[in-house]
Amino acid sequence: MKKKDIGVVALSITIVALFAFIMQGCVSQQVTDKSGVQLWGENCTRCHDAPSPGTYTRSQWDVIGKHMRVRANLTQAETQKIVDYLKESN
């Protein structure tokens, strides 16, 4: 491979990595700005009718949050905000 080609590949990798880093910050900021009730409404009703906060106890919401984090591909921050909202509204 020529030196010029290696430089182009290295520059391309750097640009992609920088773009991914910037986008990660944007997503994190969007989650930071949203409340637990917003995240609950956006995520929990995508696949099923979301139960009311009083349906389960505070400890049950912790277990459900762990389960749904995996199932719904939620971040730790999103899950914590949703579970906190459900527990506070209980």
Image (cartoon, helix red, strand yellow):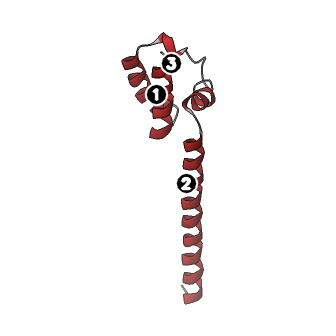
Q: Tell me the quadrant of the picture where the N terminus can be found.
A: bottom right
Amino acid carrying label 1: it is Asp
Q: Which mark is residue 69?
A: none
In the orientation shown, which residue stands out farthest toward the left?
A: 59
Residue in the image at 57% along x and 34% along y: 35
Q: Nearer the viewer, mark 3 or mark 2?
A: 3
Q: Earlier in the sequence, mark 3 or mark 2?
A: 2
Residue in the image at 62% along x and 26% along y: 41
Q: Which mark is residue 24?
A: 2
Amino acid carrying label 2: it is Gln
Q: Judge whether residue 82 can be spotted in this image.
A: yes
Find disc 1 in the rendering and name its residue.
84
Residue 85 at x, y percent in the picture: 50, 25
Vertical relation: 23 (above or below) 6: above
The Cα–Cα distance between marks 3 and 2, rounded to whole angstroms, is: 30 Å
Near mark 1 (Cα within 10 A), the count class, few <14, some 14-19 or many ≥20, is: some
SS assignment at label 3: loop
In the orientation shown, which residue stands out farthest toward the bottom?
A: 3
Looking at this view, is 35 or 27 the one in front? 35
In the orientation shown, which residue stands out farthest toward the front?
A: 88
Q: Which mark is residue 89?
A: 3
Residue in the image at 49% along x and 22% along y: 86
Residue 83 at x, y percent in the picture: 46, 27
The Cα–Cα distance between marks 2 and 1, rounded to whole angstroms, is: 24 Å
Residue 36 at x, y percent in the picture: 54, 31
Q: Judge whether residue 75 can be spotted in this image.
A: no
Residue in the image at 56% along x and 83% along y: 7
Near mark 3 (Cα within 10 A), the count class, few <14, some 14-19 or many ≥20, is: few
The Cα–Cα distance between marks 1 and 3, rounded to whole angstroms, is: 8 Å
Q: Earlier in the sequence, mark 1 or mark 3?
A: 1
